[in-house]
Amino acid sequence: MVGNKPSKKKVPFPVFEPLHEYLVKHGRLADLHIQYEDMTHYITNTPLYNIKGKDTFWETVIYSEYDQKWIHQALCNLYALLKTDGDIKVIDHLTVSRIDYCVFGNTKPFRIRIINKLNDNYDHFYVKKTDASRIYGLELEELRSPNSVSYLIDNHTLIEEHIAGLPGDDFMNNHLNVDTFNQIRIAKEFVKFNERCFVQLLGDMRAYNYIVDITPDIEGFQYRIRPIDFDQQSYEGRKQFYLPQYFKENNAILKLGFDNLTYDSVKQYQHEERSLIARRAKISSTRLNSLLSTMVEDVISTPAKVEQLRYELYQHHHNTAYLRCQSMGEIVMQNIKLVVQKEFTQSIIGI
């Protein structure tokens, strides 16, 4: 597959008032104890390498003794907000063991490692800049996928739980050499993941922007692919940008499909996933309609990209309703409408 890069670096979009009201109504806003800007006042940083000595493109940051004390306490409080709705009794035995900073990416996140002092078990969460695109991506992931996400916002700061799993690139490098039965399951999940991204218009799902969750089953394993980067929600104008199959970084996992799936089985898995999306849309229709109505009125891309995407989707679906869409929100709404009506045209993977 050919590469599929964004046209240029995406800029974050502010949270406008209707989206703010939606977040208030659905419990996504909180009075955070620390802001993203506070996290940037570190005094030194060192590159973070993985166990094989490879640069992870994260840096471990160190604060002054005075700042470290209150920052660590504030971060423990944030963890309590995410995990126990602010019950601070649980943080008595928690401590921050490391703070890492991502040197690339749109939101330039801080990753916080929290340690349980009683048993040395650890967990992570993230402190990021607020971006309306990411918020819409997180909400759509919550409402029309099989996954649940936890995050909170305060002004220009967003905190987000860690989504556990193997990074997609690590998974492809080390976990594809399995028996045929499990290879079929991996390929099947990628087909479903491809379909979910295309319906939601979640872009840039190359290998390092998603994880693979592996669950032992009665026979073999079950696999779930989950996005971890939502910055490219409904921003780009090219249809292929919303289909993970077109990223060369995913070629290894795509090859499993070529080797193990037939065209008819791919069609079946796509139909299964669209049916699940339609069912979730109906179950959460009130909240989903509220989100999409807000998204329709918001500006999360450029007019040129909206025009390009609506035309490419018109060509794909042969549906003139796309040509009347004036925003990315309208295009997403039209996608979900077609899924519910069972008129969504499948993507062609070529198997």
Image (cartoon, grey):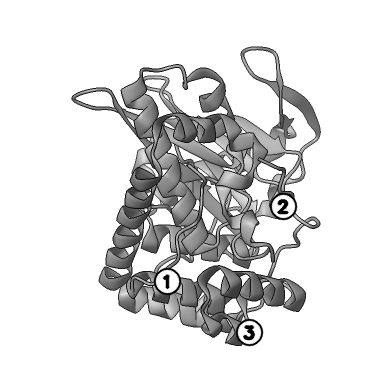
User: Could you say which is closer to the camera, residue 251 or residue 126?
Assistant: 251
Labels 3 & 1 near each other (Cβ < 8 A): no
Question: Where does the image place residue 162, in percent across and percent down from the top left?
Answer: 48, 41
User: Could you say which is closer to the camera, residue 325 or residue 19?
Assistant: 325
| Direction from residue 15 to residue 225 in the image, left or right | left
| Direction from residue 21 to residue 215 in the image, left or right | left
2 or 3: tag closer to the N-terminus: 2
| Direction from residue 24 to residue 238 in the image, left or right | right
Is 99 drawn above or below residue 151 in the view shown?
above
Labels 2 & 1 near each other (Cβ < 8 A): no
Q: How crowded is mark 3: few (under 14 residues within 10 Å), some or many (20 or more)?
A: some
- Residue at point 52%, 36% (across, down): 254
- Cα distance, mark 2 to mark 1? 27 Å
Question: Where does the image place residue 127, in percent across and percent down from the top left?
Answer: 60, 48
Q: Is mark 1 on a helix, strand or loop?
A: helix
> To which residue does mark 3 refer?
326
- Cα distance, mark 3 to mark 1? 16 Å
Three-letter amino acid code at disc 1? Ile
- Mark 2 or 3: in front is 3
Q: In which quarter of the image is residue 45?
A: top right
> To which residue does mark 1 refer?
336
Question: Where does the image place residue 21, in percent across and percent down from the top left?
Answer: 49, 79
Q: In which quarter of the image is residue 313?
A: bottom right
Q: Residue furthest top?
A: 52
- Residue at point 74%, 54% (across, down): 6
- Mark 2 or 1: in front is 1
Q: Is residue 104 visible?
A: yes
Quadrant (top left, top right, bottom left, bottom right) of the N terminus: top right
Q: Which mark is residue 106?
A: 2
2 or 1: tag closer to the N-terminus: 2
